[in-house]
Image (cartoon, rainbow, N blue to C red):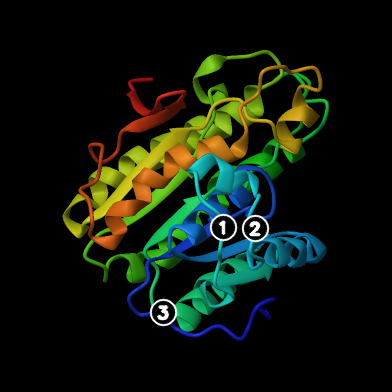
Amino acid sequence: MTAVNSKVEKQSNTPVVVITGGTQGLGLALAQALLNAGFAVSLCARTGADVEAARMLLTRKHRNSVVGEQLGQSVDSDPARLLAMPGDVADRDFQRALIAKTAETFGRIDAVVNNASTLGILPMPSVTDSTTENEAQVFDVNVFAPLQLIRLALPHLATQTQSLILGISSDAAVGGYPGWGVYGASKAALDLFHKTLAAELADQRILVHSVDPGDMDTAMHRAADPGAQGLTSPAAVAAALLALFQPLKGENKFLFTNGVRLQVTRDGLMEVTA
């Protein structure tokens, strides 16, 4: 597997964040926010053209970027802090290549953000009208791929003074909304796996959270609900999530108890019990 940006140098003192589904929506906004804050980012997505477009966007100086406006500063990303790879996150060979190439390029991995998701069949069917093929695809991308990436990244995460695993969840995980059953069940499973991992990895200084970002103005959300109004920009959500990563620089303590489920609100981040 060949990285789109293969001429990067190891940043031994720079925290490295792996983001799946990093070419649009929250994944792209978070990559931009992290790069602007001085982190290194390794991102992936299925389509090579999208990965190349994201690489060009993220390595360009954006004086008027959306993320820059949200953070109150311009975006000025160093191309040497970005690795962008095209590939299917559910493919086992690509999973190994992504983690191996990231570690080889930067010499470390400090965080994994399981952001890539699929809705499955569109329009989303009811539970009784779904198919085993649809359910298998949704769970493979939304649950099994994140678990495998975590397993592959753990040897690298465990070598850091502190590290982070973040799963992007949804209110569908607890909502029981008609038509959202298969997708919601996959996110509920992801939530439980992250909560369990937090307990199992408690002695390894690895913080684990799942977070509900809320309803965002993304292509994915519009595909599921074309008439939705009042959606939050991914850049605003990324700005709120950035606080979770700052402790990786050794500057701050982690904000929340390990294993809790978080929700993005207008005021930032809050812990939720369901």
Query: Which residue is depicted at the point 59% across and 74% down?
Result: 79
- Horizontal placement of 134 versus 207: left or right? right
* Residue highlighted by disc 2: 62
**Is 141 rendered above or below residue 183?**
below
Image coordinates for residue 57, horizontal then vertical, percent? 70, 61
**Residue mark closest to the camera, 3 vs 2:** 2
Lower sequence index among marks 2 and 1: 2
At mark 2, the secondary structure is: loop
Residue bearing mark 1:
75
Q: Quadrant of the C terminus?
A: top left
Q: Mark 2 and mark 3 in contact (Cβ < 8 Å)?
A: no
Disc 2 crowd, CA 10 A, few/some/many (<14, 14-19, 20+)? some
- Residue at screen point 65% across, 78% down: 5
Residue 185 in which image quadrant: top right
Which of label 3 and label 1 is nearer to you? 1
Secondary structure beneath label 1? loop
